[in-house]
Image (spheres, helix red, strand yellow):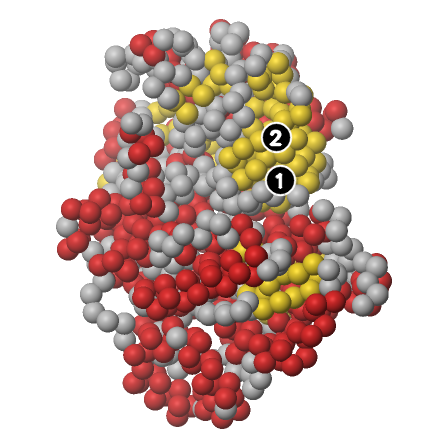
Amino acid sequence: MDFQKENISRHNFEQCTKCTVCTVVCPVTPINTKYPGPKQAGPDGERYRLKNPDFFDEAFKYCLNCKRCEVACPSDVRIGDLILSARLTYSKGKPSLRDTMLAETDVMGSLATLCAPVVNASLAMKPVKYVMDRTLKIDSHRQFPKYASTKFETWFRRHAAAEQSKYSRHISYFHGCYVNYNYPDLGKALVAVCNALGVGVRLLDRERCCGVAKIANRLVKEATRDAEINIASIRKALADGSEAVVATSSTCCFTMRDEYHHVLGLDNSDIRRSVTLATAYISKLIERGDVRLVFRDDYRRRIAYHTPCHMERMGFTQYSVALLKSIPGVDLVVLNPNCCGIAGTYGFKKENYETSQAIGSRLFTEIENVRPDFVATDCETCKWQIEMSTGIKVKNPVEVLFEALDLDATRKANNLTI
Amino acid sequence: MKFETIIIGAGLAGVSAAIRLAEQGKDVALISAGRSAMHFNSGSLGLLGFDNNHQPVSSPVEAMESMPDSHPYKRFEAASLTEFADNAADLLRRAGVKTVGNVRENHMRITPLGLCRPAWLTLEQVVTLEALKQLERPHVAIVGIAGFLDFYPRFIAAALEKEGFRCDLLTVDNPDLQRLRKSESEMRAANIARIMEGDALTRFGESVRDVSRDSEAAALILPAVVNFDGDGESLHLRQIVGRDLFYAPTMGVSIPGIAMHTRLMRHFLSLGGRLFNGHRVISAEFNDDSLVAVYTDKLDDDALRADNFIFAGGSFFSRGLVATPDEVIEPIFNLDTLAPSDRSKWFDSDLFGVQPVMNSGIAVDHTFRALRSGVPVKNLYAVGASLAGADSLSNDSGAGVALLTAIAVADRIIKLQ
């Protein structure tokens, strides 16, 4: 038996050399002293928890799950996974009504889109915000993303689905809750860009929320159920001829590629490589010489790119950066890698609001100094946080492509007669 | 993805080579598998602190001649070494890392454990014996932080008292520090530095000023827990305190080293360099004697291609080298390594003695091209701590080997293109 290979506990924790680099990069530790820090909460504490679960500390809930500790770790210890797994395994008590509501993005989204104008108006009203703040402990400073009155899926089936079969190659689009319930325009942009490149777009037979919010709020059973449905749908889509399953949200993509296996313990090994981000997929098409992009002559923008934490962890940053850089009229500034502080549902919780804004302050100041026309980023919750905190518009790189491309000329360059 | 040059490893060697190439307008990608040993650097860099008889070196240029032929420095002509060393200091300066010192004469740094050790370059504002000797009187005050376990004023005083300094020992505390102390074990230099900005920095300065009011010291020595992101903080502090200030390195993760990493990395990015952060190179594709592409653990089957590659993967800590039970290997490319063949000869039974295994590393030709099955790989160079023949620990030569070999290789690539 090879002891060095066989004797490895979950998340690689024995590889920790106690170097403390994780603590250097943790956005929470210096701001919220209730949080014991990634080294203590992660590999240090894991040794004790394995012997006695009483060493678990409910203060681990202050971890953002940003995984910046994992990116920084020179020893490949999955520190964030250790902390998250400890929360899922040892935390006592049921998730609160508020946490469940924030996590159930599909249920809340489906209800809200039914009567979007009323919901949007209510969520923006001061008395409603006050009541939510007091009863649910959802911080009243937060602006909820507006709900769309028509879901992306509905729009796609009505207006786009039919013509997709005309294309010779296809991807399946994992739109995620945000595109479906709040921002269908991003999904529409993805369909338009892919189509101009000669790629047809399909939807999965059944798409559920990727599960990131449920995992963060300890709804493991519900997250696992959703994940299993997604994995099955992705398998079917690939079997039906989709060459990849593409997301526009870095966190959805990261969750399906890594958290399903690392945190939920599901086997996604057969589909993992086929799940990718839109900018990664398009970059590879360009590199292989499969497609050509023709940009508008009159597109001139100064753009600041913010790297979302999960994008950094996934390692896909350079795909989005390269794509944005390749647009002739774009003056791109890549911002320093700092967490924006929202971390999905984390920043919506009243107890985290101040921490959340303090963490983001470096990023906000940098953005204000760069004075871009807008910020580009691949994560929707980073978008809400940056828009709320700086007043500067944030777009997904796919939207930027959509704006900058001469779609007709691109179709011609790709010899499309459809 | 395709680049002109790909550099594997983003420690001092990798990022310096990357900067050198990017400054010449080259298209460079830097692959970083976790943070580097720079995070533990004291703010002083060694080129040759001790010779092979473990005697302190006063002039690195002169002592170089006594080094064995296997040492990487011996691949430089004696005259060019001085030039490369000065180029290295200039490169650091362009990145905003301002240092004092030169290769002709070492100066003395002061370690957190209270020893004076020879150094080549030291960050401005980090304490050196020479700087203290220029004070108008040999009297300093060393200010510790209450509850901070990585800095002991008594240790620093021990070093300085031997040199004839009078040392006042002071302790500073205030509500900001008390708040940090709630998480005792996490009260490390990096976390203190993170709150040392804006009003908290001003309050810290005022607390230091108040606690040192009665001291007649010519200068204050503080632990290096400020100056994380830029120069402004320390200047601001000096103004508030109202007298000469020096920073002494702390144990554990170290702010001067982190500041060096941050500035070098920002400089590289500002030159348009491309960073693959948190990627570990796991395999490679060769075509005869040339390296074609590398693959990382994050990019599935997407190849990273380049005309030239520089391996700056470091030594055992960063797993550029791996010691198996019976050999020292380079795990990515399976490059040739030099190490004592018999494991029993790897170690000296005196823990603090010279450990021969620390001399092991990658074998290279005279232009630092890495050897593979005895043949140089045409476009793969090895630099820094993974090179064979350099025991950076016993010679205190890690930074010098990293910077000089990185610059030599970058210049060669520029010349050949």
Q: Is residue B75 above or below residue A291?
A: above
Residue type highlighted by circle 2: Glu
Residue occupying the point 47% across, 61% down = A232
Q: Quadrant of residue A173?
A: bottom right
Measured from the top left, where is residue B381 in percent x and y? 61, 24
Mark 1 crowdedness (10 Å alpha carbons): few <14, some 14-19, many ≥20: some
Measured from the top left, where is residue B384 in percent x and y? 52, 25
Mark 1 lies on a secondary structure that is loop
Identify the residue position indicated by label 1 in the image: B303
Q: In this orientation, which residue lies closer to the viewer: A240 or B21?
A: A240
Please identify the quadrant where the N terminus of chain A is shown: top left
Horizontal arrangement in the rendering, residue A413 relative to residue A151 (left or right): right
Q: Is residue B230 above or below residue B288?
A: below
Residue type highlighted by circle 1: Ala
Q: Is residue B224 above or below residue B361?
A: below
Measured from the top left, where is residue B34 in percent x and y? 45, 41
Identify the residue position indicated by label 2 in the image: B285
